[in-house]
Amino acid sequence: MEGVRILEVAQFTFVPAAGAVLADWGADVIKVEHAEHGDAQRGLVRLLGLDAAGKGSSFFPIMEGPNRGKRSIGLALETPGARKVLEELIRTSDVFLTNFLPTARRKLGIEVEDVRAVNPDIIYVRGSGFGSRGPDADKGGYDSTAFWARGGSAAGVTPPASETMMRMPAGAYGDSMGGMTIASGIAAALYSRKVTGEPSLIDVSLLGVGAWATQFSVNLALLADGPLPVAQAPKHGSRTNPLVGAYRTSDDRWLELCMLQPGRYWPEFCRIAGREELVADERFDSTEKLMANAAEAAELVAGIIAGRPFEEWLELLGSGAGQWAAVQNAWEVGQDPALRATGMIASVVDAEGKDRELVANPVQFDETPVRLTRAPQFAEHTDDILRELGLSDDELIQLKIEGAVT
């Protein structure tokens, strides 16, 4: 995307994450931040009970993830001086990207018609909680509300008898998926503009991303014309397959098995586990019998896996052809050899010159790992961007005196 300029008037993670992906792909992404306060996410010091930044460092993962590779300019959009700067940025950009609510967009004069009055060819992108039309178009939302709760994921993972609702497994969980979704829409719109000459208006909502993530269940409910029955999953395995599901090892770690052809993989598993006699067991000696007696087989599998530690099972299962995975925590994901072999954990140098690492976006071109640069400090590139627009030093100073720019 070298040569493509993205103008981002957005904050938090949902929409800025799209800008980060586009920056990963080579676009010039200019992040417009409030001239005094900056992106509101810069003020989040704790998230999910954890410190959001390292002590004594400017490296702030909650900002680095969705903002790496960008340049930051501080603009007081409500001032006349900043308006001139904004319009020049619009005039020189291919994409205008925002997650401001309609009332704020109208107040600041950044609705689609305002932006297209300056640049008729610009692709205009709105990220929202609940969509740009309908009863909740003016309502704000976060991924915990629009994506996780209302989009069906929370209900899908919360057991019927639970006294608490299951929370998202990571901060900005739905936001990150939504950002990737927006980035793909922008790529398609750039292609469409090249082919047709017409710019697109793109809408992506967290609710829509949430419904897409749970589409299998939603589609079944639509087919059934009502809520799906609550299915009580067996303790081990599935109802017809002992080699599907989570099993606990002797040292209280978990393995996820997903061998969808039980008859094919049962002999291999029994051999790996040192229980070859189970292959000829009359309860399990055919695919039909194994499926019919899945509950008994699953109890045996649970006992077998509980008899050895996690690391031993990694080696044993790794010798077979069946599908399975270790249940990993965040640190283990960051060290995953498959991710590292493919460059999905990328190096980045922070503002103090220290080497850091971030998760790369999951799309890779030509087997070439992405090269990341750090997220900008607040309004770090204001002077550089203004000079690129042709402003003299005297004009730049005057804008600062007026409070139009940082």
Image: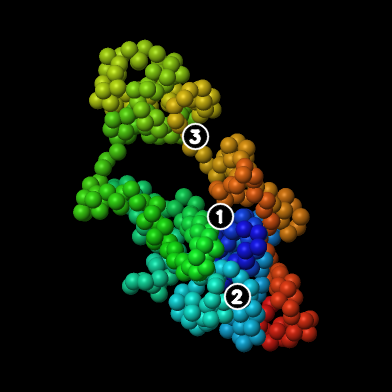
Question: Where residue 309 sits in the image (x, y, percent)?
Answer: 50, 26
Say above or below: 170 vs 311: below
Q: Is residue 79 left or right of residue 212?
A: right
Q: Is residue 187 above or below residue 126?
A: above
| Pointer 2 with pointer 1, Cβ within 8 A | no
Q: Quadrant of the N terminus?
A: bottom right
Q: Residues within 10 Å of mark 1 (few under 14, many from 20)?
A: few
**x 27%, y 40%: residue:** 232
Residue 82 coordinates in the image, percent (x, y): 64, 82
Mark 3 nearby-residue class (10 Å; few <14, some 14–19, many ≥20) = some
Amino acid marked by disc 2: Ile
Q: Which residue is mark 1?
A: 50
- Per the image, label 2 sits on a secondary structure element best described as helix
Compared to 332, does 112 lie above or below?
A: below
Q: In the rendered image, which residue does mark 3 sit on? A: 326
**Helix, strand or loop under label 3:** strand
Where residue 31 sits, quadrant-wise, is bottom right
Q: Residue furthest front?
A: 196
Q: Residue at x 75, y 75 (%)?
A: 387
Quickly name the residue at label 2: 90
Q: Nearer the viewer, residue 31 or 91?
A: 91
Upstream in sequence: badge 2 or badge 1: 1
Image quarter (top left, top right, bottom left or bottom right) of the C terminus: bottom right
Specify whether residue 288 is in view. yes
CA distance for labels 1 and 3: 25 Å
Q: Are marks 1 and 3 in contact (CB under 8 Å)?
A: no
Q: What amino acid is found at the position of numbered circle 1 in the picture?
A: Leu
**Which one is in front, 241 or 305?**
241
